[in-house]
Amino acid sequence: QVQVVESGGGLVQPGGFLRLSCTVSGLTFDDYAMGWFRQAPGKEREGISSISFRGASKYVADSVKGRFAISRDNAKNTLYLQMNRLKPEDTAMYYCAVASTQGTTMNPKDYPYWGQGTQVTVSS
């Protein structure tokens, strides 16, 4: 059984930072690309970053480029999202997902396994 568990969300002031983590079990972690998505209330789900199976290729959405960085530690079966200079518009539920591909993708249909999400709230 595949399990995807996010952690690290919380309340942070504008300009602050958080690091999200996502631990995966039940499959061979380094065989698959990984991704981060987010969804704010009343808005569509947004794909924000993806990383290839060995970490050589990364995609970052324009909305977070220069502020967010994706990384992975295959020895620990863990995916990370470093989020810097956070803005109120970054407030959302953040989801980690396991892709069915080795290369980066932001198509949600390429992600068969999802976590339950971790809430990030940016507010003063």
Image (cartoon, rainbow, N blue to C red):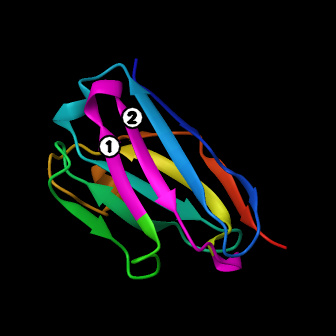
**As drawn, which residue projects farthest toward the right?**
124
Q: Quadrant of the N terminus?
A: top left
Dividing the picture into quadrants, the one containing residue 6 is top right
Relative to 1, say whether 54 is above or below: below
Front residue of this view, candidates 43 and 22: 22
- Please state if 4 lies on the left or on the right of 42 as rendered: left
Is residue 70 on the magenta stretch?
yes
What element does badge 2 sit on? strand
Q: Which residues are magenta?
A: 69-89
Q: Amino acid at mark 2?
A: Thr
Residue 72 badge: 1
Q: Position of residue 33 (x, y in %)?
A: 24, 46
Marks 1 and 2: CB-CB under 8 Å? yes
- How far apart marks 1 and 2 lie (CA) works out to 6 Å
Q: In the image, what residue occupies the spot 68% across and 68% down?
A: 91
Q: Which residue is mark 2?
A: 78
- Please state if 16 lies on the left or on the right of 57 as rendered: right
**Crowd class of label 1 (few under 14; some 14 to 19; many from 20; radius 10 Å):** many
Dividing the picture into quadrants, the one containing residue 60 is bottom left
